[in-house]
Amino acid sequence: MMYCKNLDLESWPKGEISQGWVHIVNDGIASPIQVPILVARGLEDGPTLGLTAAVHGNELNGILVIQKLFSALNPKQLKGNIVGVLVMNVPGVLQGTRAFNDKVDLNRIAPGHPKGTMSDVYIHRLLERVVYKFDYLIDLHTASFGRRNSYYIRADMSDSITSRMAKLQAPDLILNNPPSGSSVRGCAAAQGIKSITIELRDPNLFQYSVIDDAVTGIQNVCYDLGLLAGEVNCQLEEVTLCSDSFWCYTDEGGILEVQPQILDLLDEGQRIATVRSIFGQITKEFYAPATGIVIGKSVSPINQTGSRILHLGLEPSLIPCDL
């Protein structure tokens, strides 16, 4: 077992899979808060692929993706390094919350600040000590509380490398999404790290079919980058690409029912949801503001005014998976 304050890959043994902890901060009684990592180093030098899970504490599918990927690895056949950060937001996972323990979303305040708030310091050190050591990043997420997602990829499709990484996942859908500077992916991309985000459906549970799909997709990236010798297993000839997306919100609170299902194609003006009073009467109906495809949706029935209805992908079109 390795313990460190900084991920210096040269100090980890070659030809092995090692388990370790990277010390990030201390809690209120001076006990260390450490992130668990798996490191596979090949016998030959090569690029470093980083996998990060649970930057939101309720997003669990990515943890098992990393575990399964590493259980299938033979590090002696690896050319380069694969690093799996099993839990980015340790306090959030332990508390069963999306946010950090000061109630701040770590994926909205990156790169943080070395002398800022608790969450500022935590995400700043996590990026500096771990994430910025990567050459490539796959950031694993799910939907948030009360929502469901498709299996989709966020990637800058104008970049040939991230476009290819996205297609290699064989997802339900790809969203053309240049990285935000306040996200982990955005900060990594600003450092020249080629990065995509994988959205692995739903929060708070392990969903084995999408976990297996993600493992296959990440293995495809390993083959494509030359980290591993093997054949890409991507049988999609075409994949749906959306040029942009946005969330539709309610302007009246009540009991919400969202009619469309994940990946349904919607016409502009099509009814997408109803709100009922506590006595059961329909008080408001909502309609699609544009033609698009359902990327994600709310499944929580109790919704205050201003709640999310569905995530609408715009201009969906089929593009070839020309790998």
Image (spheres, grey):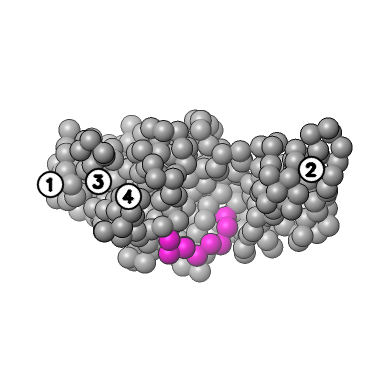
| On screen, residue 77 above or below 157 | above
Residue 277 in the image: x percent, y percent?
81, 38
* Residue under numbered circle 1: 11
Q: Farthest residue to the bottom: give it.
A: 158
Residue 71 can be seen, yes or no: yes
Q: Secondary structure at mark 1?
A: helix
Labelled pair 2, 3 in contact (Cβ < 8 Å): no
Magenta region: which residues? 174-182
Which mark lies nearer to you, 2 or 1? Answer: 2
Q: Earlier in the sequence, mark 2 or mark 3?
A: 3
Labelled pair 1, 4 in contact (Cβ < 8 Å): no
Q: Disc 3 residue type? A: Ile
Q: Secondary structure at mark 2?
A: strand
Residue 237 in the image: x percent, y percent?
60, 52
Which residue lies at the image location 78% right of the left edge and 45% below the top edge?
273
Q: Earlier in the sequence, mark 2 or mark 1?
A: 1
Which residue lies at the image location 70% right of the left edge and 36% below the top edge?
301
Q: Secondary structure at mark 4?
A: helix
Give the Cα distance between marks 3 and 4.
11 Å
Give the Cα distance between marks 2 and 1.
58 Å
Density class for disc 2 (Cα within 10 Å; few <14, some 14-19, many ≥20) is: many
Q: Disc 1 residue type? A: Ser
Q: Earlier in the sequence, mark 4 or mark 2?
A: 4
Q: Disc 2 residue type? A: Val
